[in-house]
Amino acid sequence: MIGPALVEALGRIVGPKWVRHRRAELRTYTMDGLPTRESYPGAVVMPGTAAQVREIVRLLHLTDVPFVARGAGTGLSGGAVADPDAVLVSLTRLNRILSVDRARRRAVVEPGVVNARLSEAVAPLGLYYVPDPSSQSACTVGGNVAENAGGPHCLKYGVTTNHIVQLDVVLPDGSELRLGSTHGEPWGPDLVGLFVGSEGMFGIATAITVRLEPLPPSVRTMLADFPTVRAASEAVSSVIATGIVPAAMEMMDRACVAAVEASIYAAGYPTDAAAVLLVELDGQADAVAAEADIVQAILLERGARAVRSASTPGDRARLWQGRKKAFGAMGRIAPDLAVQDAVVPRSSLPDIMDRIAEIRDRHALSISNVFHAGDGNLHPNISFDRRDADVVRRVHVACTEIMAACVEAGGSITGEHGVGSDKLGYMPLIFDAETLGAMRAVRRVFDPAERANPGKVVPIHACREWRAAPGARL
Amino acid sequence: MSDVVHGRLRALLGTAGVERDAAGLPRAIPDSADALSLVCRLAHDEGWKIRIEGQGTWLPADAPADLAVSTRALDQVVSVSPADLVATVQAGTPLEALRRRLADEGMWLALDPPGRPERSLGSIMATATAGPLRHGFGPVRDHVLGCTVATGDGRLVKAGGRVVKNVAGYDLTKLQVGGFGGFGIIAEAHLRLRALPRADVTLLARGMRDALTSAARDAMAAELVPAALELLSPALAAEADWVLAARFVGTDAAVQGDVRRLAPIGNLAWQPLTPDKTAPFWSLVARGSQGGPVTLRLGVLGNGVDDTIDLLAHDLDDNLLSAGAGSGMIRWTGDAPVERLRAVRRAAAAREIPMTLERAPWPVRRALGHFGAYREGVGQLVGQLRDTFDPGQCLQVALEGSGGDGER
């Protein structure tokens, strides 16, 4: 528990109104986007400057209190949830875009800047920030850095780690470091690459230098509907095999399309299709036009019943609407939604979709699939009611079976949502004790006392012991 | 001592797994990741220093050590999946061997590192030496999905995975790519491949350096998407003038469109290379970066390219030099005393430009370090990471120099 003295000391740093410690005030912070993990933090503190972050972290270091950094709380792995003995550091007030360098295509932002706001802010300069998680209208760049977030357009342009070049970080002992360089060349070993995706366990990034990309001069979005999921999956591999790399290749199955079309987000997707595939091409107009012809021919050859194509922003937005709002639409099916995340090699897509359907039927569950087909990143989403204990149990068993199937296919337990607390138990499926031990040892270089986001990502009981680095900060 | 080491290695690996180098140093040649880890464990237990070697074409095999460990018998392409565009290769595999194998199946690894074609993939990954294609396809780390590493004390760590999108656990692969072996010896890696492009066209423009860097900026502003846009010194390009080389790969339509848009850029006479000249040209550039004993890279963008080349030209020379106009990387090859190189690093750091020593004889590596002029606190962190992965300090790798200028 967090005592009154610490609450007061935090208040002296940020001002009392930016500290929450009464139970009712903490309610908002008991969960992130994962419905199955709930915990009251000991207190919530909301710094408004990087200097305050440093002072807070130093105080928590001095008092040996664990902390959890949190952005918008849209994460889906229970990573931004704190236990009662920990202080939750909410970074949403650090929401300034500090600088934009048009010529070098760089921006420096605070961690609480909302992902979509950054792209909006630089759009007049003809630039955008590429990673676009589905939650981009709410999630923060700092959270994206912690999770190494992805999104539909990561197929062509890479995930968050490919767009972060420099980080100012506060380590868990309160010391400050600048990692990387604005040019993108690591300064020494690639510590920026190591920090991105560390899920808040190496420290807190207070200034993030991102790479911006020029807005493509031409974009074409195509929507193809298929009689079988297998045919759609095979079409994905056929397109990639041409050497054309679409900006995005997104698939939705029948259940997902049904949910979208029954909602206010209806996008005119064919509800009798087994699968709908969205393909987006971008680049110079002549190249996009020629590549669109090739892609369309492949989609039809692979069994698409129809291919719709859009080039204007309005028409493209309509095709995308159902995809972007799919998660919201699924919310209507049942009170709770387990948004799953796993990866398989692209060639395994048809088989894994059959496996998921079989698991769904065996456990009598409702699963909608919407996913980044181009890179094999699945999102089987299970609609359920967490008040029903038996359903919760079946959801858990089904998730475990889906993870095991993906790992068996040569894949991974998470492609963009992170491990958090949700997937701790799956980590030994893909990493041996030695490798888990290495991860823990690296974490202890940044955080010897393991106070930053404790208990996440690496299941400590499954680690082979590595000795702590001599001279590690204590 | 040498006989003891040789005998212990022979007991571990068999006669075929050990030899002596030209100077009589025992050299272990493990043919599996497990065997590699056993060698490291033995060295760790005995307190022996290890010199890491690949195909022996990039870093000189001159680090003082009790034994050499060569990855050259780890030369198998373990698997290639055309449908997934992923290959699993052992670290000693020569780049050229992989390239041939992939080309047969319609794929390629979009890396064109400096050096000889038989350079091992382990060397390319450990030194993170990308070439001109970095502009279009990213640095080396973007091509490595996961890797198996033997640490200095003989643990086998399997970082990452073999799928293109993966955030399970901390990204330890990033530490190994560009770690120069200081965090372990890479045994095997999963690599991201691409389908062979339909079209692959290189055009050259020749002229004054300033005119070419200005044209490169114009090309970027015009939103051309070259796979490479590289400024090359006359000696490196084997030409009379400076050369700006633009390479476009992709579908015919995309490439032809970009070639058309390039034509007016910079008022230059852009001349396409004939297909039979393209590969030899880039191969010449890659080999040219080995035309002196020392190779450096500096990260710099935009207008900084001109200033940084001026800095190099003033303090060193601009004989064998290349600059990625959009990728933000300048590579210099030549010869200079340690103090001069150190001064360049300090001058670059003052401009917030990191300088990495990619290649040099051991006395230069030891004195200068692959890295240096770190910002405050970074050197300590790097040192602790090294202690974690090589607690006995067996891996004879000079990440930081001995001159006490690790941090500024």
Image (cartoon, coloured by chain):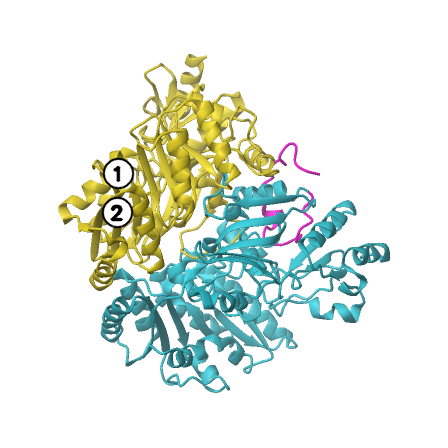
For image coordinates 38% across by 38% down, the residue present is B309
Point out the stretch of residues depicted in magenta: A449-474
Q: Chain of mark 1?
A: B
Which three-letter amino acid code belongs to the residue tagged 1? Val
Q: Chain of mark 2?
A: B
What is the secondary structure assignment of the residue under circle 1? helix
Residue A192 x %, y %: 52, 47
> Around disc 2, counting alpha carbons within 10 Å, would you say few (fewer than 14), some (14 to 19), or many (20 or more)?
many
Disc 2 to disc 1, C-alpha distance = 11 Å
Which chain does cyan denote in the image?
A: A
Foreground pick, A200 / B47: A200
Corner quadrant of residue B93: top left
B340 w.r.t. B216: above or below: above
What is the secondary structure assignment of the residue under circle 2? strand
A61 w.r.t. B28: above or below: below
Which residue is label 1 attached to? B285
